[in-house]
Amino acid sequence: MRRLETAVLVSLLSALCLSSCKLWNSILHDEEVVAKVGNNMLYRSDVLKVVPPGIPEEDSLHLAMQYINSWASDMVYLEIAEKELSKEQKDVSKELETYRRSLLKYRYEQLYVNERLDTAVTAAEVEDYFRQHEEDFRLQRPIVRARWMKILPESPDYETLKDLMSSAEEGVWDVDMAAYPSADRFRDCSGTWVDSEMLAREMDTDLQALLPLRPGGFIETPAGDGRRNVAYIVAVMDAGGIPPVEFCTQRIEDIIISSRKHHLTSSLEQELLKDARDKGKFVIY
């Protein structure tokens, strides 16, 4: 009788312990495990963080599987490394400290720069920089001023619109095109220089297929949906030439702002070192 009571008590304690373990695990991870490598668990919530809401189910599954496989690969490598590497080889404290210092330095520099950076660039500054560095902006490929559209070739408006493209004044074509619903994706860059590669992308082709570009000429390419891309070339500046400053403005503004950032970070480093020396914090023996 005593042996039976003992067995029942052990069973009850075991069941209670198992129930408590399950309850504790549920409290910690009250969700579905989607993958496991050794003792490492990947939970459904972790996977959902990398899957954007609202995308098609097939895309969601693809992203989820990519993440799961990548996670599993990392865990497999980690387990092997833990077993095969020596204690010294597994000690990454120095590397982590170096990375920590580098990351904190970078974050403070970003804070410092963002609080002080002047992002306004005047036209005079752009002009001055361009005059001093003209050779840096010599064209690697042609730039164009053009108008283009996408249209069904059998449209009754086809030839009319081509005539309009070649005769319309700058800024007028967009207004006139609104009266012709058979064409879409029309754009007027007759008053602005654009990169010929950008025009090639708009024409659903590559740059070589557009060459040679000639002012006053038409270019036509298939759009892939039964329509045709039609472009009228207003003007061309060939590769090797110096473009007008307005074509380079955005690039020059980026260069000037980048230079200001570099100056700020360099001066910050010098100021901090000087301050540390003045206060006796930085001493060379």
Image: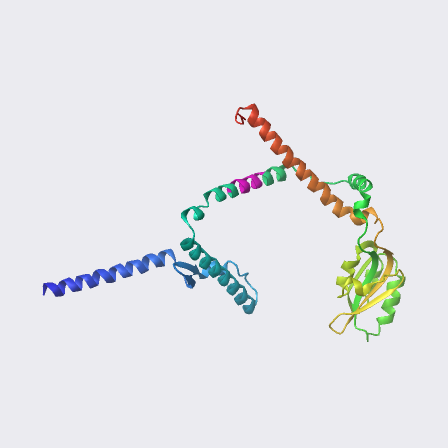
User: What is the quadrant of residue 23 in the picture?
Assistant: bottom left
Coloring applied to the structure: rainbow
Camera-nearest residue between 192 and 272: 272
Q: Position of residue 234 (x, y in %)?
A: 87, 59
* 253 is within the stretch colored magenta: no
Q: Position of residue 65 (x, y in %)?
A: 51, 65
* 101 is within the stretch colored magenta: yes
View extreme (left): residue: 1
User: What is the quadrant of residue 52 in the picture?
Assistant: bottom right
Residue at 82% x, 54% y is 193
Q: Position of residue 37 (x, y in %)?
A: 42, 61
Camera-nearest residue between 141 and 268: 141
| Picture quarter with the N terminus | bottom left
Camera-nearest residue between 214 and 116: 214
Residue at 26% x, 59% y is 17
Q: Position of residue 40 (x, y in %)?
A: 41, 58
Left or right, 31 with respect to 143, comes to left
Q: Count the labels in the image.
A: 0
User: What is the quadrant of residue 276 in the picture?
Assistant: top right
**Predominant SS along the magenta part:** helix
Left or right, 77 with respect to 241, comes to left
Residue 119 visible = no
Above or below, comparing residue 157 to residue 276 in the picture: below
Residue 44 visible = yes
Magenta stretch bounds: 100-108
